[in-house]
Amino acid sequence: MQCFKRNQQYGRLYVLRLSVAPLCWTLFTLSSGVALMPYTFITLPSPVGKLKLVANGSRLAAILWENDKPNRVRLGPMSEAPGNPVLQNTARQLDEYFSGTRVRFDLELDFAGTSFQRQVWAALLTIPFGETRTYSQIAEQIGNPTAVRAVGAANGRNPISIVAPCHRVIGASGKLTGFAGGLEAKERLLTLEGGQWSPIGKTGELF
């Protein structure tokens, strides 16, 4: 027995197959004819609160904040998997980052978003540890200098926080701007990395 449901926003086809056990369903996401594994997660305590690490098969799909808005990052159903090697590796690298012994992450990532969003998230990965960029600089980097506000919106939807360092994007004045994990967490991450930003006033214009 199986049923089909299309997600209009992402254009993916979800196939739900009923297993032998009653009321037990497994979700397979089909994209371009390729079956993907169901999402799995673990929770990691950290200096910036509990982080929810989410994997899609062999790739890291999300790092969510303790008080993340429910619809900020849209993922499919997931199950807890404490022994998942991808998540354990991610947790280890994050622990090293917070302890000051890691400045780069070595993880396979699975970004789910629009083409524009993926461009912005790819640009985030190029910002070195200890440096910051403005929203205008990111817009210029992706070849769309007038899309500063759209860059800000995509930055806010970044599913893989910390690893894709959206916290390294600041206002043109050098002040901190909105952040899914909260401005206190953003400040703490930038302080850990020794990044340059203005501590006087934590909000400012994007331009």
Image (cartoon, helix red, strand yellow):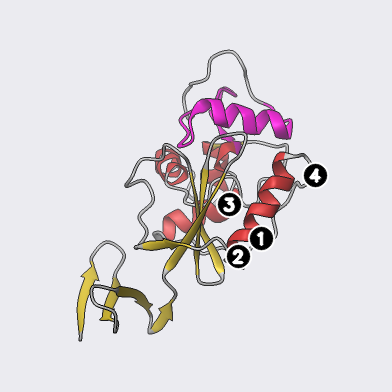
Q: Which residue is mark 2?
A: 86
Badges 3 and 1: C-beta atoms under 8 Å apart?
no
Residue 37 at what x, y percent from top left?
Answer: 44, 74
**Which amino acid does the dot numbered 4 rest on?**
Thr
| Left or right: residue 49 compared with residue 15 | right
Q: Which residue is mark 4?
A: 101
Q: Which residue is mark 3?
A: 123
Instruction: Give the label, 4 or 3, closer to the camera.
Output: 4
Given residues 120 and 95, the one toward you in this image is: 95
Q: Quadrant of the N terminus?
A: bottom left
Q: CA distance from mark 4 to mark 3?
A: 24 Å
**Which amino acid does the dot numbered 2 rest on?**
Val
Q: Which mark is residue 89?
A: 1
Q: Residue drawn at (40%, 59%), measured in percent from left and top?
A: 113
Q: Residue furthest front?
A: 21
Q: Which residues are magenta?
A: 168-196
Q: Residue drawn at (51%, 64%), measured in percent from left and top?
A: 110
Q: Which mark is residue 201?
A: none
Q: CA distance from mark 3 to mark 1?
A: 23 Å
Instruction: Give the label, 4 or 1, closer to the camera.
Output: 1
**For numbered disc 3, what is the local secondary structure?**
helix
Q: CA distance from mark 1 to mark 2?
A: 5 Å
Residue 51 at what x, y percent from top left?
Answer: 53, 44
Residue 202 at what x, y percent from top left?
Answer: 52, 19
> Considering only order in the chain, which callout, 3 or 2, is on the residue closer to the N terminus?
2
Q: CA distance from mark 4 to mark 2?
A: 20 Å
Badges 1 and 2: C-beta atoms under 8 Å apart?
yes
Q: Residue furthest right?
A: 101
**For numbered disc 4, what is the local secondary structure?**
loop
Q: CA distance from mark 2 to mark 3?
A: 23 Å
**For numbered disc 2, what is the local secondary structure?**
helix
**Which amino acid does the dot numbered 3 rest on?**
Ala
